[in-house]
Each structure stands twice: as C-alpha cells, then as structure tokens.
Image: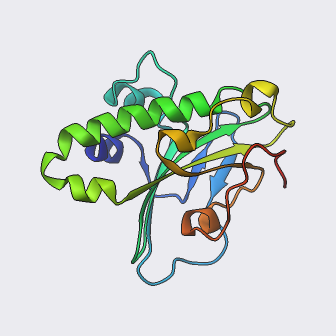
Amino acid sequence: MPFSILLLTSASSKTHITGEKGDKLSMERGELQDGELVLFFDKVDAGPARLALGMNNQKCCDGIIFYKNNTQNVICLVEMKHTDPGDAKEQIKATYDRLKHLLDKECESCKDYLRQITWKAYIRCWGSSPTSKYRDGDSLKKYGFKDERMCRDDDIINYLRGEMKARKNKKPRG
C-alpha cells in the first residue's frame, strides 16, 4: 500500500524534490551507473499523498527517494528548509513512523526484505545555521536511520550511493 499510494500520488518523472519556495534537491552529477534505480516521490507533504498516507494532521517530509543498486535498497526521507531547519527532524521522524507502520503491516510475508532497507534522512537547508532546537534534538539514528545529513548541497546522488559520510550536528556547508 505505501508504494502504491506514493506511486499514484507523488511519483515524479523529474529527478528532483521541490520545496515550498521553489527550492530543489536533485540528482545532477553524472548518470546512473549499471544496476542503479532512483525513484523520486515529490510533494509528499501536499494534498493527495499526505492524505493517502493518513498523515492529515501530522508533520510530513517534503519528499521520498527510493534508491537501489546491486547491494542496497535505500529509502531516503527528504526535508527542505529555506532558513532554519527547526522541526525538520520531527517531520522526517513522523513520515518514517507512518511509512514503517504501513510497510510492516503490508509486508507480513516479506519481513526479510524490510530488514534490508537502509533508511536515510537528508535535510537541505539554504539559510542560517541550525538553531539549538535542531542541534540539541535527538539523532535520527536512534530510530533506525543509518545516516542523517544536513547540508546545502542540492545534488543528492553521492549521499544515496553512500559516497558522502554523514556529519552530525555541524553547521551546514555549501
């Protein structure tokens, strides 16, 4: 159900996620390598996708990226903030909780595949340094995320491939 919901409501033929103020996070550097697949689900926080996921009155992230190569399956939750990242982690955590619940419920016979998913979080912030609310917040790793990253880089492919190491609680860099 989660994949069909996302596929029908927010799958994008474009290779980017758009933010509230027209900001974009995309895959720009190079082409896909052999064995790679990337699916962008844009505007998850708006209209049909949010309602279909049952997140009507909850915080929700901007987009979801499914990345697969020969060795890994990654679900990356994306939140974009034009200025202060404030509650970005809360939005990602709420979306993760909902997706995880739906996947656990739907995949009774495929639990082994669910355990193979690598969860990542990417917070794209254009503006100021993170406030203490963001910096002092819980690390998403304790909820099951392998990596979490906040930065100004608008090309996500290296992060999806695992070629960019996560930096925890540091000032974003461009």
Which residue is most to the bottom? 34
Looking at this rendering, what residue extends furthest in the front direction?
A: 142
Task: State which quadrant residue 153 falls in.
Answer: bottom right
Point out the image quarter for the C terminus. bottom right
Colouring style: rainbow
Residue 102, by quadrant, is top left
Which residue is at the far left? Answer: 109
Asked if residue 107 is positioned above or below residue 94 in the image, the reply reads below
Q: Is residue 145 visible?
A: yes
Please tell me which residue is depicted at 51% across the width and 33% down the height of the picture. Answer: 93
Front-lying residue, 140 or 2: 140
Q: Picture coordinates of residue 164 (x, y %)? A: 67, 66
Left or right: residue 27 versus residue 107 is right
> Total of numbered circles in the picture?
0
Figure check: 136 above or below 43: above
Is residue 1 something one can see in this rendering? no
What residue do we see at 56% from left, 69% from top? 161
Q: Position of residue 90 (x, y in %)?
A: 57, 28
Residue 79 percent coordinates (x, y): 61, 39
Q: Is residue 36 left or right of residue 174?
A: left
Q: Residue at x 34, y 60 (%)?
A: 116
